[in-house]
Image (cartoon, rainbow, N blue to C red):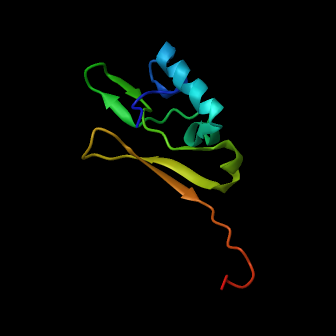
Amino acid sequence: DFNSPLTSMDRSSRHRINKETRTLNDTLDQMVLTDIFRTLHPKATEYTFFSSAHGTFSKIDHILGHKTALNKYKIIEIIPCTLADHNAMKLEIHHKKKSGRPPK
């Protein structure tokens, strides 16, 4: 749980990302991982956290997935939550059943 925006799109203020976040993004790239929500919704301005101290919104919660498996991610959405300081994220994964007989 990084609790950090990964791109400037993940902040309502559009502030640039810092050096630590760039390093994190480089590591995710090396591991061939991606933020599924941002990949499927590149221009979305939906957020998972509101900072009352700063009056800003940010998406600091992420579901990461391997880039080669993007076709398995069916739907991803941010679900508003009134009882917590973070909104929930929901990912539906398309699971293709293999045909044929089950193994013995």
Quadrant assignment, res 32? top right
* Spot occupied by residue 88 in the image (x, y as percentages of width and height): 39, 47
Camera-side residue of 33 and 30: 30
In the picture as drawn, the residue positioned furthest to the front comes out as 104
Camera-side residue of 2 and 78: 2
In the rendered image, is residue 15 in sight? no
In the rendered image, is residue 75 in sight? yes
Task: Identify the residue shown where x is 55% and y is 19%.
Answer: 22
Task: Identify the residue shown where x is 43% and y is 38%.
Answer: 61
The answer to whether 78 appears left or right of 55 in the picture is: right
Quadrant assignment, res 49? top left
Quadrant containing the N terminus is top left
Task: Identify the residue shown where x is 28% and y is 38%.
Answer: 85
Quadrant assignment, res 66? top right
The answer to whether 45 appears left or right of 42 in the picture is: left
Task: Identify the residue shown where x is 60% and y is 38%.
Answer: 34
* Spot occupied by residue 21 in the image (x, y as percentages of width and height): 50, 21
